[in-house]
Amino acid sequence: MGASAIEVGVYNSTQDVPTIASWPKFKMIELGWTKENEDIESSSGGLVFKRGNDGVFIFLSSWPDAVQISLVLVP
């Protein structure tokens, strides 16, 4: 068993990790996803959402000039 197609997106933001994390918590639930896990600190963190057999992993990492946001969709 394995994913048929994993999609990955990487983005940068100048906002802090907790501020960035607040958006997907609201928006993903609004779109019908269920939050499975959350571990957010001031400089890094992650969120896991599930809908049916699909999962989304959101990783946040602080760098000196930006926060990197990595999104992984596993169907």
Image (cartoon, helix red, strand yellow):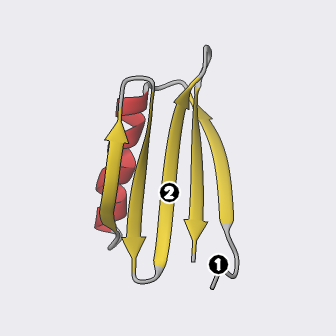
In the figure, residue 39 lies in which quadrant? Answer: top left
In the image, is residue 39 above or below residue 14?
below
Of the image marks 2 and 1, the number of the one nearer the N terminus: 1
User: Where does the image place residue 1, in percent across and percent down from the top left?
Assistant: 63, 85
The residue at which mark 2 appears reads as 57
Amino acid, disc 1: Ala
Is 56 left, or right, of 38 in this rendering?
Answer: right
User: As rendered, which of 25 and 50 lies closer to the eye?
Assistant: 50
User: As rendered, which of 2 and 61 lies closer to the eye?
Assistant: 2
In the image, is residue 26 above or below residue 74?
above
User: Where does the image place residue 70, in percent across and percent down from the top left?
Assistant: 59, 46
Name the residue at the right extreme.
5
Mark 2 closeness class: few <14, some 14–19, many ≥20 residues within 10 Å: some
Q: Residue at x 49, y 50 (%)?
A: 58
Q: Residue at x 36, y 46 (%)?
A: 23
User: Where does the image place residue 64, in percent across and percent down from the top left?
Assistant: 61, 14
Is 54 left, or right, of 8 in this rendering?
Answer: left
The residue at which mark 1 appears reads as 3
Q: Residue at x 35, y 36 (%)?
A: 40
